[in-house]
Amino acid sequence: MDLLALLATGLTFEGRFTTGSWVAFGVLAGCAALHLHCSRWIERIRRDHSHLPHVDLCSIWILAGALVLPPTLAVALVVFVYVHRWWVVGRWDASRPPHRCVFTTSMMVLAALAANTVAGLTGLRGHLQDHRPEGWLDLVGLTGAGLAQWTVNTALVGTVILLTVRPRNVKDALGSGPDNLLEAGQLALGCFVALAVAWWPGFAVPMVVAAVALHRTVLIHQLELAARTDAKTGLLNAEAWHLQARLELQRTRQQPAGASVGLFMIDVDHFKDINDTHGHQVGDAVLKRIAGALASAVRRGDTLGRFGGEEFAVLLPSVEHLEAVAIAERMRRQVHEVAFETDAGAQVRGLTVSIGAAVWPDVEEDTLEGLLAAADSALYQAKRLGRDQVQCAGRHRRTRWNPAARSDSVDQPGQPRPV
């Protein structure tokens, strides 16, 4: 990537620039530095709460530079932005060494040059430098340049993720919907910054306020997501799962007669042996693989969360008994296929889970607590019968579980609660 960036920079090199180009470069570099300085604590918090690549919001200024500057100055702006970002944020993070900053810089140089080339071919860059952007062709140039930068950026990052992280499918390497929407939003801001610079360079300065506000909004969303997410598996944590499951169960009870809902309790068999044999770091990695296998087996709309330790819980709206059993068996088979190789070369495979299922109204419990108790009882029945199987709680309590008051019952004075 570094060699490609150097080659592309050499092929597009220009040695002489107009005063207007230098002024635009200085304004964009100053705005980018001011933006990062005002949001540096936000970036540090985002870095501390994320162990994955994230959108850094530098594209606002990089795209603007690609649209209004000659290729060489556009490259210089990219280098300035990421060197400054590393100095303000990255040098404090031992888990992100300098070579990662070099890679990101090289990648963004290629993305900026792609946008710069489109702007030049459509005539947009010349119109912006002459302070006269207008017409549908320039709109096509703006859109095409932004799309070129996004395409190159996404393709290069996705390729590296596929080569290193090796996600389950290509879609996971292309980023989530919110991440791509954020990238599109900042590219749109970059287009308006370029138009402001074309009108008069000083008009770009107020856009720093919009960039910082966007940065803060992204942080709030990330913290909200972190508060709901289990750090080891990426699933909902227990508190968030309870809240979402309770809401889903309430919606189900409000539906016409015939509505149903299922709940699974899942426990990984003999998981302690993995921790004792290979260590807790391997155990955490295996637990994450298991979570991925379970997530791939449930339906869209099912609520999967980590309940605690090596236990998981699933709420399945609108599911009948036979379908619930089929889904549970699919989850069990998916976990069987999980394999993990430790750094020492040892293989962890042959994993099994025990699953307890409860489906309302087959089980006469329509509260979350009641369904949890019924599914938990079925889970322990599966454990007693030899593990690696699915057991369902029946309509009648063949095995005892702690009863929960039904949602439509009202305790009367002197009337005992059911036991």
Image (cartoon, rainbow, N blue to C red):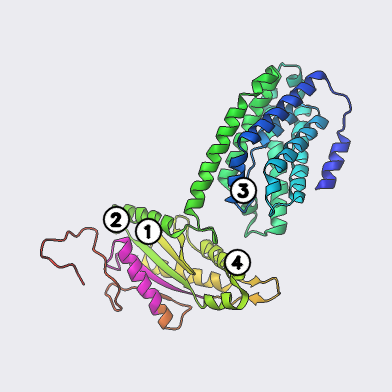
Badge 1 or badge 2: first in the primary sequence: 2
Question: Residue 360, can we see it?
Answer: no
Mark 4 = which residue? 285
Does dot 3 land on a helix, a strand or a loop? helix
Magenta residue span: 352-381
Q: CA distance from mark 2 to mark 4?
A: 38 Å
- Residue furthest to the front in view is 92
Q: Whole-percent x and y of residue 32?
A: 68, 32
The correct choice, above or below, for 176 with respect to 349 in the image is above
The correct choice, above or below, for 269 with respect to 219 in the image is below
Mark 1 = which residue? 318
Between circles 2 and 4, the one closer to the viewer is 4
Question: Label 2 sits on what residue type?
Answer: Arg
Q: Nearer the viewer, residue 161 or 101?
A: 101
Q: CA distance from mark 3 to mark 2?
A: 42 Å
Question: Label 4 sits on what residue type?
Answer: Ala
Q: CA distance from mark 3 to mark 4?
A: 21 Å
Mark 2 = which residue? 253
Q: Quadrant of residue 325?
A: bottom left
In magenta segment, residue 373:
yes
Q: Whole-percent x and y of residue 323?
A: 41, 66
Badge 3 or badge 2: first in the primary sequence: 3
Q: Nearer the viewer, residue 304 or 237?
A: 237
Q: Are marks 1 and 3 in contact (CB under 8 Å)?
A: no
Residue 47, numbered label: 3
Q: Residue at x 16, y 61 (%)?
A: 411
